Amino acid sequence: MEIALVEAYLVSRTADQHVQARLDEVEALMRRATALDPADACCFRARLADQRAHALNRLGTDEGYRRALALYEALPADDVHPFASYRRDAGLAYGYLRAGRLDEALAAARRACEHAGDGGYVRLRVMGLLMQAKILTRADTSEVLGRAQAIAARLEDQELLLRVARARDLPPRRLPSE
C-alpha cells in the first residue's frame, strides 16, 4: 500500500490520467489488508482520501472542490492517529475555505495544527499555520506567519521558508462569490 501510494503521488506530478487507476489499486489493497493495525488503517485511508482530493482540487472547478471536501467529510471523526486527524482537518480547512465557510475553515486549520503538534509533525504544523494565514484577513496573519517562519527557520527548511515568504506577499483573500 505504501509503495502504491507513493507511486500514485509520483504519477500525479506527471500524468493525471493514470492517478485514479493507481489510487483504485491502493483502495483494493486496503480492502484485502485484514491484519492492519487500526491506526495504520486510519492513516492509509486519510492518505488515500487526500490524494483523491488533490486530484479533484486540481480540476479547479466548483464540482471538483465539492467532491474533494466530501472525501474529507467522509473520513472518521475519531482521532485515532494524529497524522490521520491532521490530514482530515487540513483537507476540511481547504475545502471549507474554497466553499467560503471561513469560520469552519479556520477552526479546522487550528485543529490540524493541534494534531500536527500532538504527533510531533513539526513540518505539518507549519503547513497548518500557512493554511490559517490563507483563511485569515491580511491584518490577522502576522502572528501565524511569524510562528511559521520561526519554526521553518529552526528546521532550516528552505522550502517552508519560501512558502512563508510567498504567504507574506499574497494578495488579500477573495471569497468564492467575488
Image: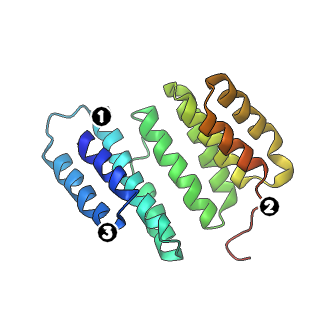
Q: Is residue 3 above or below residue 104?
A: above
Q: CA distance from mark 1 to mark 2?
A: 39 Å
Quarter occupied by residue 12: bottom left
Where's residue 158, x and y in %? 63, 34
Q: Nearer the viewer, residue 56 or 35?
A: 56
Neighbour class for label 3 at 10 Å: few (<14), some, many (≥20)? Answer: few
Three-letter residue code for mark 3: Gln
39 relative position to 115: left or right: left
Name which of mark 3 and mark 2 comes first in the sequence: 3
Identify the residue position indicated by label 2 in the image: 172
Tag 1, which secondary structure?
helix
Q: Is residue 44 above or below residue 13?
A: above
Can residue 62 be seen in this snapshot? yes
Earlier in the chain: of badge 1 and badge 2, it is: 1
Residue 67 is labelled as none
Expressed as whole percent of the image width and height from the top left, the position of residue 67 reads: 44, 68
Instruction: Look at mark 1 in the image and give the residue it sits on.
Output: 40
Residue 116 in which image quadrant: top right
Whether residue 74 is visible: no
Provide the secondary structure element on which disc 3 rests. Answer: helix
**x then y, percent, for residue 134:** 70, 53
Which label sits in the foreground, 1 or 2? 2
Residue beneath the point at 70% across and 35% down:
148
